[in-house]
Image (cartoon, grey):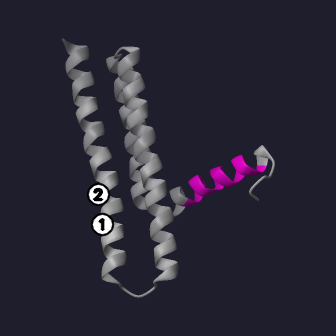
Amino acid sequence: MKNGALYFKLKNALNGIVLTFKTESNFRRHIYSALLTVIFFVFLQPSLVWWGLIFICIGLILAAELANTAIETWLDYRHPKIHPEVGKVKDVMAGMVLSLSVLAVIVGFLAIVDTLT
């Protein structure tokens, strides 16, 4: 449905997010962590710039986890048996999510320090 109506594109995108939430425990962990982070910072009340950075980090992590899931699913379909090159791709994708998670922790720490000083 390359040139379909916007409604159907949005519906398909939301279906992908819901499917990932139902099937991927890491995605659920990231969602729950994001919710806890937002609740924590609501009480801390950082400036709007920090809120922007926090939400950018959350969005990047969730998008990376969705991409990771999509690529892993496709690789598992194309190569159902263990293959060393497939393992490398999966490791790189997991590294992407990890590096964004570390970035988010750093941004969160800086937001806390800036808000409390």
The quadrant of the picture occupied by the N terminus is bottom right
Q: Tell me if label 2 and label 1 are in contact, CB under 8 Å.
A: yes
Residue at the limit of the structure toward the bottom, as seen here? 81
Q: Which residue is mark 2?
A: 95
Residue nearest the viewer, comparing 112 with 78: 78
Q: Position of residue 38 (x, y in %)?
A: 40, 30
Magenta span: predominant SS is helix
Q: Is residue 75 above or below residue 7?
A: below
Instruction: Look at label 1 and name its amino acid.
Output: Asp
Q: Which disc, if any, is residue 91?
A: 1
Q: Is residue 77 left or right of residue 101?
A: right
Say how many tags the image has: 2
Q: Position of residue 27 (x, y in %)?
A: 44, 54
Instruction: Look at label 2 and name its amino acid.
Output: Gly
Q: Which residues are magenta?
A: 8-19
Residue 14 colored in magenta in the image:
yes
Residue 96 colored in magenta in the image:
no
Q: Residue at x 33, y 78 (%)?
A: 85
Q: Residue at x 51, y 72 (%)?
A: 74
Q: Position of residue 108 (x, y in %)?
A: 28, 30
Label 2 crowd bin: few (<14), some (14–19), many (20+), radius 10 Å:
few
Q: Residue at x 43, y 54 (%)?
A: 65
Q: Is residue 101 above or below residue 74?
A: above
Residue 72 position by quadrant: bottom left
